[in-house]
Every structure is written in structure tokens, then in C-alpha cells.
Amino acid sequence: QVQLVESGGGLAQPGGSLRLSCAASGILVRRQPMEWYRQAPGKQRELVAGITGGGKTNYADSAKGRFTISRDNGKNMVYLQINSLKPEDTGVYFCYAAPYALTPGTWGQGTQVTVSS
């Protein structure tokens, strides 16, 4: 059974930084394509960043330069570092394990990020 648990969200000031964490079980993040999505208030969920099993990363245009996706294979965790926070970064951030081999796509429960002074 695949389970993803996000943490690290909260209230932050503009210009600050946050590191979101996604603890995975039932899969190996070193093999599974992993992604972070954001759902802003009143908007659809959108892809922010992804990392392939081979370690290749990709970012939405809005995330380039301030967001960094990474993983720790030993801890089986995926991270999203967000720097220079802006109010428009506010939303619920979801970790997603993309379908791979016989494993279906799986969502975490999300972690709220609020950027406000």
C-alpha cells in the first residue's frame, strides 16, 4: 500500500523560505517519478515540480529559479524547497507519486502553505 505524508507547510512571510517534505512508504522514490502540485484557493491543482527515477527534474515556469525538488533515497523522502516566498505561493501543496510499473498514481493529503505579512 502506497502512502505519502507531507509536512513542512505553515505560515511564512514574503521573502522567507520553506522546505516541504514528503515521506513515502510502499514505493521507492529512487525509482518512482515524484511530483509536487499546488492548489491555490479557488484554482485547479497545478504541477509545480517533478523528479524522475533517474533524477531528472522539471519545473513549471512559475517555479523556475525559486523552487527546488530533491530527494533522499536513504530516507525515501522527497522535498520541495521554496525560496523568496511570494503571496501567490499560497496554497495546498500535494506530493504525488506518478504511475510506475504496476503502481498507480497516489496523492498525499497535502500541506497548507500561507505566505502573508
Image: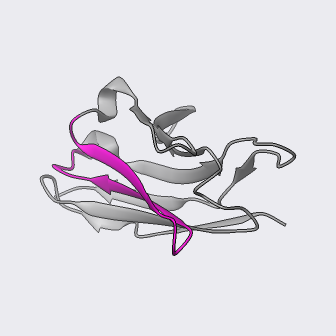
- Name the side, left or right, on which 27 lies relative to 78: right
Q: Give the side of residue 61 with respect to residue 32, left or right.
A: left
Screen quadrant of the N terminus: bottom right
**Residue 24 figure quarter:** bottom right
| Viewer-side residue, 31 vs 81 | 31
Decide if residue 104 is on the left or right side of residue 70: right
| Residue beneath the point at 52% across and 75% down | 75
Q: Relative to the observer, which residue lies in front, 2 or 112?
A: 2
Residue found 82% across the figure and 49% down from its top: 103
- Tell how many labels: 0
Q: Position of residue 9 (x, y in %)?
A: 40, 66
- Vertical comparison of 67 with 26: above or below: above
Q: Quadrant of the C terminus?
A: bottom left
Is 82 in the magenta? yes
Residue 7 x %, y %: 48, 70
Residue that extends furthest to the front in the rendered view of this protein: 54
